[in-house]
Image: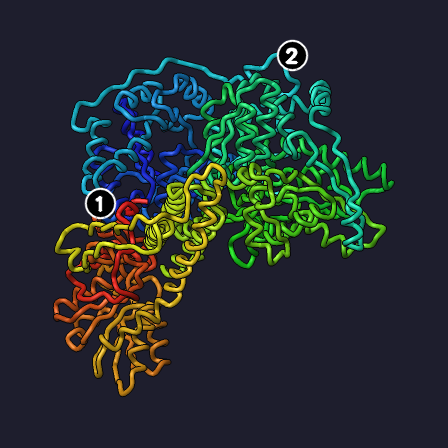
Amino acid sequence: MEALKNVFELKAKQNATAFVTFVTAGYPRPEDTVPILLAMEAGGADIIELGVPFSDPIADGPVIQETNTVALEHAVDYITVLGQLKEVRSKGLKAPMLLMGYYNPLLAYGEDRAIQDAAEAGANGFIMVDLPPEEAIAFREKCAKANLSYMGTTGSSEKVAMNKTLPDIIARIREYTSVPLAVGFGVATREHFNTVADAGADAVVVGSKLVNIIKNSPKADVGKNVEAYCREITQKGEPARVRSPPVPRLSTPELNAGKTGPPVVNTASEPSVLPARFGQFGGQYVPEALVDCLAELEEAHKSAMADPEFHKELRAHFGYMNRPSQIYLAENLTKLAGGAKIWLKREDLNHTGSHKINNAMGQILLARRIGKTRIIAETGAGQHGVATATACAKFGMECVIYMGAEDVRRQALNVFRIEMLGAKVIPVHSGSRTLKDAVNEAFRDWVTNLSTTHYLVGSAIGPHPFPTLVRDFQKVIGEEIKAQMQAVRGKLPDVVVACVGGGSNAIGTFYDFINDKNVKLIGVEAGGEGTDGDRHSATLSMGQPGVLHGVRTYILQDKAGQIVETHSISAGLDYPGVGPEHAWLKDSGRAEYTVATDEEALRGFRLLTQKEGIIPALESSHAIWKAFEIAKTMSPDQDLVVCLSGRGDKDVEQISELLPKWADKLDWHVSPRHLPHNIQAMVSEPRNAVAHRGVDILASKLRRRRLAITRQIVGSRATALETLLVLRQVIAKARFSNLEQLVTIIRSVGRTLVEAQPKEHSVGNTVRKVLHHIREEYHAATRGSSTTAAKPTAFSISKFVLQGQPRKHVAPQKNESSGTLRENDPDDPDSFARGLKPVLMEAIQDVLDELETVYDNISKNAKDHIHSDEIILTLGMSKTVEAFLKSAAHKPHRREQIAFLSDIPPLLIALAVPRRYDGREMASSLSSSGISTFLVPDSSIFALMSRVNKVILGAHVILANGGMFAVSGSLMAATAARAHSTPVVVCAGQFKLTPLWNLYHEYGASDFGNPSDVLGFENGDLVDKVDVVNPYYDYVQPELIVTYITNELLKETYDDEDNEL
């Protein structure tokens, strides 16, 4: 704390401004952080902010968000950050260091522990950008006890130009505090620095510009360039510039400056009459820049709710919205269930097809009331986007809809509707590219354009007052249910059911019944593929309290407090948080929350479609199924009402894609072939552009692995198998009229999967192999089955190295016999696909068979490479090597001894070692097969190597230059083998051979584990003396490898044109 005070006191005496720099820990690589921090101080930084990575940084622009994403890919967590902080202190850094970030990672780590550990590591304070004032007081007190500072945030602008109202903003803050003010966002030049300083700031923060410098610098020059830039800003070594005295100002913000009409009854200066919290949940966990936005919105909502004229205006539009929506007795469902009467609240009959129009119309009128002309919104399934665009079209307002790129792809029909209504759809490609990322982008837009823009939040989520505001416009659902049931049954329903994602339709349905204790309230979440795994969106059922998108509620997070990716068959329920009022209803016991899986949702969809002739939205289908099951347990004199929140026409395309997979399980066989050709084209065509949902699922699995979340696919072979199965499904469902269209589809799928996990090369290899087979089968089918191929050039790994370049593909010369397929047939566009698909399916099955038998085929070669009385050394656990060695052991009259390296980390040297003790697994497996096996530490490798006859290793990927990436420790083993002239043999399936070259840094293709897995922070002084790198894989140079053993003869497997997908 004193270090910060000393900096500001010194600068005040010099009439100068402090220079504050920012970098996210772990960007661009974990090992770069310490040198960057030292370079900042050398360049003149007075204070350094070290960012703690978070998955959903709503207060930051895309530049800083990218650094968070990259850091999380390297598994950088709070423990890692503390280790980096302690290391840089040990290397002499004296500048005050502030840990800057979001509250949830600290909440997950433990607030008290986080503060204490930070103090011990050498931090001088915290900057929590989203901690609300009421909680910041307690946090500040804890920091003070640990002799740490705590700071809030303000900002200049995210634009290049400085905010012209900055002097007024600073003057306003000065009215309430005398503490030093540091101002950032958008500062890039010395001129910017001087402008902010002259506006009255005590310190100027630079972050995004430094990130760009780091990003664009060669790895060897990062530190030098960072230091040079800092010197340019500080003009270190030159006479100090004395800043101009600021002009005296007094600035009080005027809320709702754009509104017309009489003054409002209530003002923002009065205590909030909206419930900022529901028990422990709710609140405003937002950066200071959003406070004015929220204060303006709360003031407007308070006045509107107190104004009878506003309610009169809203009800005047009920005819347009088709309110009241009807309540309908589902007689067939009731009869089938044999229990309670099942009533449907028909929100699906509202204008635009869902309950979303209730909230959209209410907020549009609210925005007009305060003079806003531009509306932004986020959407998942697209229903909220359609409703918002519809209301904007009616009132002539500009409309921008943010939508995750994945949701844009799976809800193409709603995207088209939104754009047809005149709105603009902006796909969001950051993060998981779903609803939560769309929310992040919408918040950024809002704070940048507050004067003209209203953020029309679609669900009961986000910081206060959004959850209350949305509920107030949706509670008409429950009010109508109560009145309608009294009219038709003379009593209240016994059970009310609604699906829950963010929770707007459910809270609108539940709210009016909260005080009616005899009415059971049941929310149904998306159980996805089951809550026993992690592919679900069951936030209330499986989540923990935390902070996301400005609100404390239940969220789905990992142990480090990072938001995990969710899954649901329905885009509208695919969200890792939930409204805070639902969280309170759960904890208070007033409402129950359960789940319906993807399969159950499809059963609910089919049930209502075929028994009542009503096609529901997939979101609502979750509630339909659970309501049907609950009704079975009730008596016939009881009543159950389920909110049918939306209609299902938006999901028809997706259902058509899903049914082939689920047809047998559901016993529901419907084929698009029975549709008219133009409708079939409408259903199929979007899949040609974006592959199909199986691609999204596999990409999600791969991305989870990339983001250091629990792996759902383990091993390159399993990844190749899943990739091949997805490609087979894509080809089976694709609609194409010529070869080029099919290749484009497969390339698109390949790019999506490779981008999801670029360091798992078996994905790209599998795609390339399928493309090669497609061309081969195409030529065979169109030119005749007989070919006169040119003799391929013989090739080997060694020739790769000697030639210094990849082989050139020798295209086979086909004969000119007439083909059996015709491309681009105008009379029957699908004839080409129908003719080619069967042979492609056979070719892909051959590749599947090859993958299934890869271990057996490689192990057949064991007798040629392992001989009697040889001592073999291997490393870690490799299924390929395991099968190879077991095959060798089963030869008659054999007796081998095989030594295995364990992965026990060394204690005195910095070494990249395997993170798992899988050498023990290998030793146990081989020993149980009768092989004499010894488990030895890798520190003994040089001592043992003189007695070893061969080193046999597995590979993660084999590169075109003959080198490979293999499990960490392989480089040490291969180097020791070379020193003793011991041959190194590598066993790997052909799917691990890539045409790519090792033209990058030797760590460029390696994933990194947490350094604390090797040397924990608790090891004290030892941490200061060691540089720890923990890669999953080593790069082993080609000259260290003698022989590769694969499952078939090397041959032309890929086409050169597919090297870059």
**Quadrant assignment for the C terminus:** top left
Q: Are marks 1 and 2 in contact (CB under 8 Å)?
A: no
Q: Residues within 10 Å of mark 1 (few under 14, many from 20)?
A: few
Residue found at the far right of this picture: 490
Rounded to the nearest whole Å, what is the CA distance between mark 1 and mark 2? 63 Å
Q: Write down the quadrant of residue 328 in the picture.
A: top right
Q: What residue lies at 66% left-to-right and 18% top-to-bottom? A: 265
880 sits left or right of 527 in the view:
left
Instruction: Give the residue type at disc 2.
Output: Pro
Tell which tag, 1 or 2, sits nearer the viewer.
2
Q: Residue furthest top?
A: 261
Label 2: state its secondary structure.
loop
Nearest the eye: 1039 or 450: 1039
User: Tag 2: Cα neighbours inside 10 Å, few (<14), some, or many (≥20)?
Assistant: few
Does residue 170 appear to the left or right of 198 in the view shown? right
Image location (x, y in percent) of residue 681 = 53, 39
Furthest residue toward bottom: 893
Foreground residue, 545 or 246?
545
- Percent across and percent down for residue 478 are 74, 37
Q: Image point 33% across, 70% down: which residue?
A: 857
Q: Which residue is mark 2?
A: 262
- Measured from the top left, where is residue 1039 in percent x and y? 15, 60
User: Disc 1 marks which residue?
Assistant: 92
Return the disc, 1 or 2, that comes first in the chain's sequence. 1
